[in-house]
Amino acid sequence: MELTAVGKRYGRGGRWILRGVRLAVGSGELVRITGANGSGKSTLLRLVAGIERPSTGRVVRPGAAAYVPERFPPALPFDAASYLLRVGRVHGLSEAVARRRSGEWLDRFGIADRAGTPLSRLSKGTCQKVAVAQALIAEARVLLLDEAWTGLDPGARAVLDEAAAERAAAGAAVLFVDHDPARLAGRTSAAYRVGADGGLCPAEEEPPPRAVGGGGPVMEIEVDVPDGAPLPERLPGGPEPTALGGTAVRLTVAAAHSDALLRSLLLGRPAVRVLAVRRREGQG
């Protein structure tokens, strides 16, 4: 995905919200977009999504984009399951695949029992889960998350953290905006800031994930990598690798990140074979 000299303003004499933006995001990258309120972060994501057109410059995507907007309109005339099915069909999924993926994400977010509830009768938090699910069922080449964590409970935020990392591990280009500076810390490929002049520049590097062995439980995940291919550089939790001989590798990671790590390993490229999973107590 690439933005070349992109600018955006509303009206011929309007203020430039974005100007001269250049950005290249490759497959498998997870990129944070930061900036002050009103700086143009949401506008940038809408341009990438194709919802709006740039006033100047060009936006090139490697394929379809899936987008979670900052505000989800809950007054749509659908129940949760019907809405997800319709969105899946719009993305070109067969009815069977759209139903299966919708059910999986409703279940993963803990709202399968609300599948038949009209969106207008769902709580704000549950509506937000549906808003996130409608983007994830597409498994699009580009995933855009505009403050998608806002309104979610802690469990759902963790699910979305994992989902964003999984999509990147599966080869998608993922861009996200969030007010929490620790969101996906240590997992991102890069971070950029929208400045007051509407330009885009690299932001400060994000802090690394919590070190393994800081006193809490850790997981040891032994995997076999076909043909000795290298593992992705940025895996959830920043696991410590240990070569075991041949094509086997032991990955040691804080227990809190083990589920996300396993999903990334199983869904990403290269595909690996999990040989063993063991839990042990960390050493302080």
Image (tube, rainbow, N blue to C red):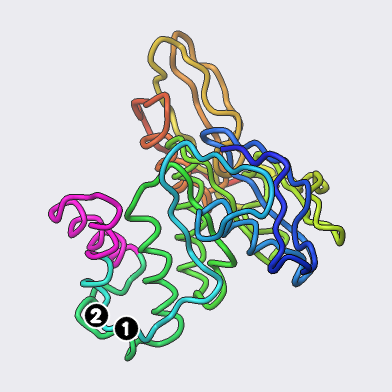
Q: Secondary structure at mark 2?
A: loop
Q: Residue furthest bottom?
A: 121
Query: Which x, y percent locates residue 78?
Result: 25, 80
Q: Give the residue type that dot 1 points to.
A: Leu
Residue located beneath label 2 in the image: 79
Task: Give the Cα separation between the discs numbered 1 and 2.
Answer: 5 Å
Q: Is residue 270 magenta?
A: no
Q: Position of residue 236 (x, y in %)?
A: 55, 43
Q: Is residue 183 positioned above or below 203 on the image?
A: below
Q: Position of residue 2 (x, y in %)?
A: 61, 37
In the rendered view, tell whether residue 122 sits above or below residue 178. below
Amino acid type shown at disc 2: Asp
Q: Which residues fall within the magenta stretch?
A: 85-108
Please provide percent x and percent y for residue 246.
Answer: 44, 8
Crowding at dot 2, Cα within 10 Å, few <14 / some 14-19 / many 20+, comes out as some
* Location of mark 1 (residue): 119
| Residue 210 visible in the shown view | no
For the point 45% across and 80% down, the residue is 125
Please, what secondary structure does the residue beneath circle 1 have?
Answer: helix
Observer-nearest of 60 and 127: 60
Furthest residue in direction left, as rendered? 96
